[in-house]
Amino acid sequence: MSNSNLIFPDIETDRLKLAILTLDDIESVFNHFSDENVTRFMDISPCKDRNEAEEIIRFHIDDSGCRWGIYSKSDAEFIGTCGFHCWFQGEQPRAEIGFDLARGYWGKGIMQEALKPVIEFGFKEMSLNIIEATVEQENDRSINLLRKLNFEREIELRDQLIYYFLLREHWGLR
């Protein structure tokens, strides 16, 4: 499945630059995802080699969504990723949002700053009606972030994961 014909642009915020991951990012992705703190609440193990980093990038290139690398504007350091996967473009367009951040940047509002324009892009340019997220029950940081971004929690756990969703109209769009 492809990304349709939508172009996923670079996104800039006060402190960050987001750029779609490419195979040129293998080294940065390897360094980032080889940290067990980054992958702790993800459905992947820490990267053991660059081939695994390439597989992560290829997954996002081939998936029906997008994944941006997050770079600190102050020093151009690769500090995380975020984006959409499982993009369904049918009657109720939706996608799942995912994100990860290097430990040294936790607790500084970085991911909230990155996700606001990404969510805006999802609703406006991808025409999403619903953005979904899944979080492990112990991942307090992600749970708090989703709450700050007005995601609503589904009542029932599935596969021991908490499911969240954000509706277009709850973001202030019709």
Image: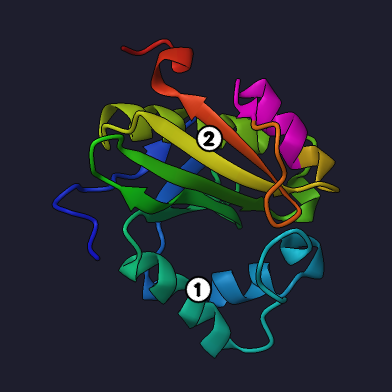
**Residue 87, x across and y down, in percent:** 35, 50
Q: Is residue 87 above or below residue 164?
A: below
Question: Does the magenta portion include 152?
Answer: yes
Q: Identify the residue shown where x is 76% and y is 54%.
A: 160
Give whichever of 25, 164 is nearer the camera: 164
Label 2 crowd (10 A; few <14 / some 14-19 / many >=20): some
Q: Is residue 81 above or below residue 168?
A: below
Quadrant in the rendering for residue 145: top right
* Label 2: element kind: helix
* Label 1: element kind: helix
For this orientation, the residue located farthest to the front is 156
| Left or right of 99, for residue 7 | left
Q: Amino acid at mark 2?
A: Leu
**Residue 44, x across and y down, in percent:** 66, 72
Cα separation, mark 2 vs mark 1, equals 20 Å
| Left or right of 105, for residue 117 | left
Q: Amino acid at mark 1?
A: Ile
**Numbered circle sitting on residue 115:** 2
Identify the residue under disc 1: 56
Give the residues in magenta: 142-153
Q: How many marks?
A: 2
